[in-house]
Image (cartoon, rainbow, N blue to C red):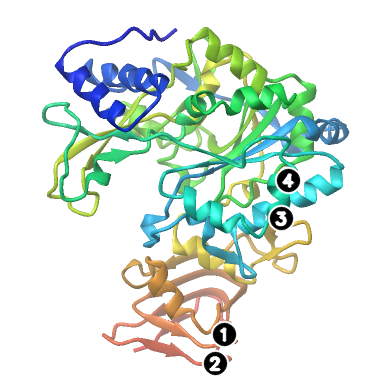
Amino acid sequence: MPGVKRQTGDRFSAVVERLRSDNMPQLLIDTFCHHYAQLLEGGQPLLGRDDISPVKQVDDLNDLKNVTRAGKEALGRTVLFKLNGGLGTSMGLSRAKSLLTVKDGLSFLDIVARQVDILRRQSGGRLPLVLMNSFSTNDDTANALEPYPELAEQQAGIPLGFLQHRVPKIRQDNFKPASHPADPELEWCPPGHGDFYTALLTTGILEKLLDADIEYAFVSNIDNLGATLDPQILGYFASKQIPFMMEVTDRTEADRKGGHLAESRDHRLVLRESAQCPEHEMDDFQDITRYRYFNTNNLWINLRRLSEALNESNGILELPLMANQKTVDPRDKASIPVYQLETAMGAAISIFPDARALRVPRTRFAPVKTTNDLLGLRSDAYVLTDDMHVVINPERTLDPPVINLDPKYYALIEDFDQLFADGIPSLIACSHLAIEGRVKFETDVELSGNVSLRNQLQRTVLVPEATRYRALGQRASLD
């Protein structure tokens, strides 16, 4: 159980002073000092092959029977959390990523708000929606929710959102809080989504939910539109009285570097991230046949059991520290090297000896991290159903399209939108799309099979209106 005794010394004094200057609550200060002490003692603990073993089998969503009714009955005691702190800076966004238009003119936030409204009407009950915002996304999100006044009206006194904390970046050379006078905001960073648990306490959200007899929580990233509140999964979670459950999916080659499920020596489930793996065992970490299950970051939490765990640990869950090495200005690699101290929300699975994992199809893990993902989602390869679920187009007979856009010309949303300003090409029959160089599409373009477009000129090349590329494995040189 982590202690909360006050740390002393010049290093801790500087950290505490920085946090107090930003009016951070005492629990956040204690939590950060706990992680800071771990950094000074040698950093994050590693999990090697002597500490863990692969998980051989977990329950499967496809095998669940006779639990949907229990899920529908539990909806009135459930809260839907969405992690909404990201700006999408990798795509060049400067406001909340959840406001990005993704399908049929709707943003992530629009779709989630409408999903909640439909679930409330179908169940005839309440279903609070609570967003964990960051300082960067809070105001934009509040403005974007103004067209949905019914959301707040049916929250049963539960706020629509709360703020994730922020913590100082730590210099790598002397372990002091970093200073960056040119832009003081860059001295701060989010403490990872493991801060979810700390913020539930400091904002009073957890207490409000329990007072309102809200017992179950579903938590997911707002950019993952596959992560819908499924009454079948809720029914399984509630009827089995599970304290904490992680949705996992089969690892693919694309997931070799991502966090995966393992089992500790005392037979608890654990989440291992790449930063926790000894460097000489990285090949073992990336073996997707050995560690088969990938963390989707779709989590189900029994709030009463969580409250008990937080009380027992004085509000500080023992989540593994991840000391990520960055520069104080992420756009300037010559700026001061720093550590960003973070924890992962899913790592709390190891806190509960009776926690479980549930294998789900890949359709429940479809985050939009790059413009490659965005193109697929905006295309006709996916459709938005009447109940606001984004699913593979029923007319499509292939797996989701594999898309690789030239990052030099498509990585930033401003450039992406310009090159697809006249419309998104039809991808309903496209298995793979690779674009090299700057290619602009006119209306009614159709791509089928395995299509590769290459432009080696220094100017933009146009794909004319009504162009059809139908041949399997076709490579079109546009120069």
Q: Earlier in the sequence, mark 3 or mark 4?
A: 3
Residue in view at x 44 percent, y 16 percent: 318
Residue 244 in sight: no
Tag 2: amino acid: Glu
Query: What kind of residue is marked 1?
Result: Val
Q: Which mark is residue 465?
A: 2
Distance from Cα at disc 4 to Cα at disc 2: 47 Å
Measure how far apart labels 3 and 4 are at the Cα level.
Answer: 14 Å
Identity of the residue drawn at 76% across and 51% down = 117
Looking at the rendered structure, the kind of residue marked 3 is Arg
Looking at the rendered image, the disc whose residue lies closer to the viewer, 1 or 3, is 3
The residue where tag 3 is placed is 114
Q: Nearer the viewer, mark 4 or mark 2?
A: 4
Sooner in the amino-acid sequence: mark 4 or mark 2:
4
**Residue that badge 4 annotates:** 153
Q: Are marks 3 and 4 in contact (CB under 8 Å)?
A: no
